[in-house]
Amino acid sequence: MTAAADSAQGLGLPGFTLAPTPWLRTALRLKPGAPLTLEDDHGPGLRLICWRTEYKRSAYHLPWPRTTGCAVVVRPDLLDILSARASAPIAIRDVVMRLEAD
């Protein structure tokens, strides 16, 4: 992304960002692709998705997201490869962070 915060170019990155480790990139034989994407010879394999929602609006300031998040998505065949190469069980977690209570 070209911006670190909300801008005309996009949402920017959230306060926390998931990033693949060198071990993961090597185990899945992935290389940099399109922005926020790692790929192999078969196309995109791993992608970071960021979102913001529940914008608070006011006449006094710009809209501000109250809920943000990010996810790493992986192509199903790569998840099978990862499961075979990992020495521990693979856990899938969902995390949603609320920035402000109403």
Image (cartoon, rainbow, N blue to C red):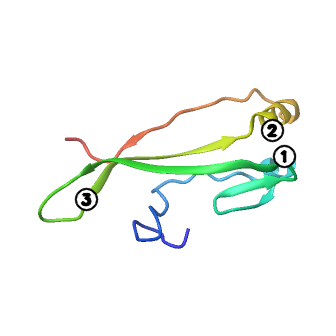
Measuring 61% from the left and 51% from the top, which residue is drawn there? 48
Instruction: Give how far across and how far down residue 21 sits, in percent.
Output: 73, 52
Which residue, given by chain and number where applicable, does mark 1 sit on? 28
* Image mark count: 3
Instruction: Give how far across and how far down residue 94 sits, in percent.
Output: 53, 33
Q: Is residue 71 left or right of residue 100?
A: right
Quick one: which residue is furthest to the left in this view?
Answer: 59
Instruction: Give how far across and how far down residue 32 sits, in percent.
Output: 76, 62
Q: Quadrant of the image for the N terminus?
A: bottom right
Which residue, given by chain and number where applicable, does mark 2 sit on? 78
Contact, mark 2 vs mark 1 (Cβ under 8 Å): yes
Q: CA distance from mark 2 to mark 3?
A: 38 Å
Contact, mark 2 vs mark 3 (Cβ under 8 Å): no
Dot 3 alpha-carbon crowd within 10 angstroms: few under 14, some 14 to 19, many 20 or more: few
Image-quadrant location for residue 67? top left
SS label for mark 3: loop
Residue 92, relative to residue 66: is it above or below?
Answer: above
Name the mark on residue 63: 3
Mark closer to the observer (1, 3) = 3
Q: Is residue 101 left or right of residue 72?
A: left
Q: CA distance from mark 1 to mark 3?
A: 40 Å
